[in-house]
Amino acid sequence: MSSGGSDETADGGAMPAPVKKIARTVTPPYRGRPDAEMTTIGIAYGLGLVVLLIPLLPFIVVVWVVSKITGFLARKAPTDRLP
């Protein structure tokens, strides 16, 4: 294996040169467009999630507070250390 900027692969074969000409295809190029229908569906989905999660928010907060308190008490609790 030679060092420097040679065009050889690890097994000693020659690497192909980069393509310099763009190949024409039979398919037309894709031109993006705004997709208002999917935007509307996404907004409706997000609003549905918000409507479902707002009533659950007090329960989520209570569970989070209880977990923080128990974690704090677990760190402060004495541990039994055997000599």
Image (cartoon, grey):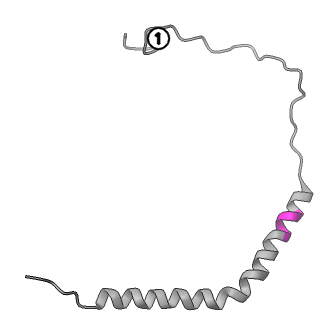
* In the foreground, 69 or 23: 69
Based on the displayed image, in which of its 4 quarters is residue 72 positioned?
Answer: bottom left
Based on the displayed image, in which of its 4 quarters is residue 49 positioned?
Answer: bottom right
Q: Which image quadrant: the N terminus?
A: top left
> Residue 42 vs residue 76: left or right?
right
Q: Amino acid at mark 1?
A: Glu
> Residue 22 vs residue 66: left or right?
right
> Residue 56 vs residue 33: left or right?
left
* In the foreground, 37 or 80: 80
Tell me if residue 29 comes above or below residue 55 in the rendering.
above
Based on the displayed image, in which of its 4 quarters is residue 61 positioned?
Answer: bottom right
Pick out the residue farthest to the front. Answer: 82
Q: Residue at horizontal 37%, vertical 13%?
A: 3
Count up the numbered dots.
1
Pick out the residue farthest to the left. Answer: 83
Tell me if residue 33 comes above or below residue 22 in the rendering.
below
Q: Residue at horizontal 86%, vertical 35%?
A: 30
Prevailing secondary structure class for the magenta stretch in the rendered image: helix
Disc 1 is placed on an element classified as loop
Q: Which image quadrant: the C terminus?
A: bottom left
Determine if the magenta segment contains residue 42.
Answer: yes
Q: Position of residue 42 (x, y in %)?
A: 82, 64
Determine if the magenta segment contains residue 48.
Answer: no
User: Which residue has dot 1 on it?
Assistant: 8
Q: Residue at horizontal 66%, vertical 87%?
A: 57
Tell me if residue 65 comes above or below residue 53 in the rendering.
below
Q: Residues within 10 Å of mark 1 (few under 14, many from 20)?
A: some
Q: Where does the magenta region start and end? A: 40-44
Q: Residue at horizontal 51%, vertical 90%?
A: 65
Q: Position of residue 33 (x, y in %)?
A: 89, 46
Q: Position of residue 16 (x, y in %)?
A: 58, 11
